[in-house]
Image (tube, rainbow, N blue to C red):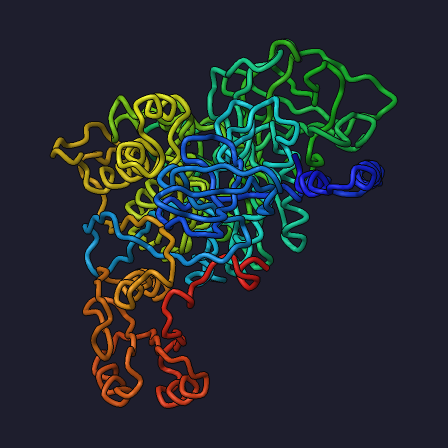
Amino acid sequence: MAKIEDLIAQIPDERLRKAMVEEIKALKKTKKFGLVFEEHLPETVRLPRLPVHKGELVSLKRESGNQLWRVRSIGKGIATCDKAVEGYPLPNDSKDFAVTDLVVVRSFGDPIYPALVPVDRVSRGGPEKPWHVLINADNFHALQLLLYCYEGKVDVIYIDPPYNTGARDWKYNNDYVDKTDTFRHSKWLSMIKKRLLLAKRLLKPDGVLIVTIDEHEVHNLGVLLHQTFPACAQQMVTIVINQKGVAQGCLARVEEYAIYVFNQAATVQTHHDDLLSPQRDKSGKLDMPRWERLLRGGNNSRREDRPGLFYPIYVDPKTKRIIKVGEVHPLEKKPNMEGAAEGLVAWPIRTDGSLGNWQAKPSTLRELIAQGFVKLGGFDKNRQTWTVLYLNRGTRTRILNGEIKILGNDKQTGAVEIAYASAEAKQSNIKTVWHRSSHDSGIYGSGILRSIVGSDVEFSFPKSLYAVRDALGSVLRGRKDGIILDFFAGSGTTLHATCLLNSEDGGTRQCIIVTNNEVSESNAKLLQTEGVFPSDERYEAKGIAEAVAWPRCKYAINGKRDRGASLTGTYIGGRELAAGFEENIEYFCLDFLDPAQVARGDAFQAILPILWMMSGCSGEREDSKGSQSWFIPKHSPFAVLIKEKEFRAFRKTCEERKDIEWVFLVTDSEENFATMRRTLGRKYECIQLYKSYLENFRLNTQETLI
């Protein structure tokens, strides 16, 4: 049910309830413009580590779906709960449950207090490289937290959300969404919209959002993106991900889509591979500059459209040399095709056999032939004419500019032999259709994932590593220190692709990825039959973050698995998987704390990773309980003043550290903070922290959700 119907169901007066139902039906028939979907669908999250107290909204650990209960009282380990709809208790519908069977639930809008709990790390990049971050969390809350750290700072957001195929491969409110769900599309759009609104605030003015999707939601998504980013340009790329095709309906689907949303200052990088044109040179050498067909195609390509461009070109078929360019043939006269079958003359004959026209007038073509800028291709027996090739104005300009060089002339035909003067000169705009074997999701998605994590890894439809690299590279090849975010990270392909991109050009790009720890439906059922439920260690070990994303990131960077076995195989280009990458990464779990239950030292320790992220994830992170007068980590560019009275000594210590860029001042006084900030000057980015540490990063507040 949608939220409005749930609320109406609580009205005790039957006549009023029925009247409201009829009014709502009429209201929903009102015509709207743009994308119309039910946006009032409530979304909640389970917080298994929070203690169950009186008044809490809870659900049963062992049940799917999202039936909610409000705790009325607790005694001797038993909670008396009232059944609730949207958090409101229903009268005369209560039950008793063991407290251990309950889990605290928060609606998206109830304040919660985050803590980043360190889980593991890999350090191979040295102090010069920033740290990548993997966060095991619900992405809605993670995005809110990231706003504190990265608002307006992210270069590229790349996401691969669930495709909503009806295959029970994603959950809404702890329940799988399938084809039988009446609100399937509304749930998906509601879920995506909430996250896009937060993601929008993270992008830089020249940032780019890239969303991959297939035909099930591509049109809905396109309209939603236009509504959410009205000032942004938008383009869609078609990516061939399975050349063999997957049977869907009457046709075999081979593609998916990537929608690019460009902030107003955004640009895309040119590249030597436009991702569509044939790659003829398998040795890795630069392709040759393109010769264009002299026969006009498209609009105005019929003889009668351009009568002055219809004339014969005389040829020596033995040497393939152009002997002479004839004069324009009058429109009212039929051409004499004598000699055409023998290849002695070329007329502009179109592929359907009708008469066409050339792209240059006779005098211009004679000049181009004299310069060696025209040559013959093959002889087409069906059309009984030659394919005539020439260098168009753009290519000739690049010859004059030195981007393309002339190597010499063919001894028989006189045509020039040309090549790109440099790799940069070969670059062109990336096209909107990508057809590369490296984008095959089977070989370079599932295959690479199995090579790294193991053949028994359970994850459906991972992206091709190279498709993601090319998507990121289209924006970031000119931004070697760019920041990348993926909040539907799944198996961790985006971080892996970032490492690969950095290895190719010496970049120091930083990647933050967020994935939940959802357990597959089959595994969840099996574990539950064994009495293992969410938040149990065995259950969590089977989740995406724990069993797929983190092992992949860790093993790919290390070049080996935990037990020391080196990875086998090579990347395209020859790099050994066993070489790993010179990168740093830390893995966190987003937890939620009760400020009333957390000691001050534990609270300080809980927010330290957030301060480290705010300062750029630079240097190996260090822990502290905050019991000193200040905390200044040895390897990171930030400092925290904990006791105000020690400000003078703190300031002096900061001045001795030339790398300090961020200063966090713990004080509840706005006046004291302003005074200390003025004293420190403009050298530092100063942030006020309240003494109740967890209050500084409260989520689901009006400020973070607007």
Query: Does the image show residue 174?
Result: yes
180 lies above or below 268: above
Q: Quadrant of the N terminus?
A: top right
Query: Does the image show residue 511?
Result: no
Q: Residue at x 56, y 57 (%)?
A: 705
Q: Nearer the viewer, residue 546 or 653?
A: 546
Q: Residue at x 55, y 64 (%)?
A: 703
Farthest residue toward the right? 332
Q: What x and y, as percent, mark residue 134?
A: 33, 47
Q: Quadrant of residue 557 in the image?
A: top left
Q: What x and y, as percent, mark residue 423?
A: 38, 45
173 lies above or below 623: above
- The answer to whether 265 appears left or right of 570 in the picture is right
Q: Nearer the viewer, residue 187 or 603?
A: 603
Farthest residue toward the left? 564
Q: Nearer the viewer, residue 287 or 571?
A: 571
407 lies above or below 434: below
Q: Quadrant of the C terminus?
A: bottom right
Q: What x and y, as percent, mark residue 615?
A: 34, 66
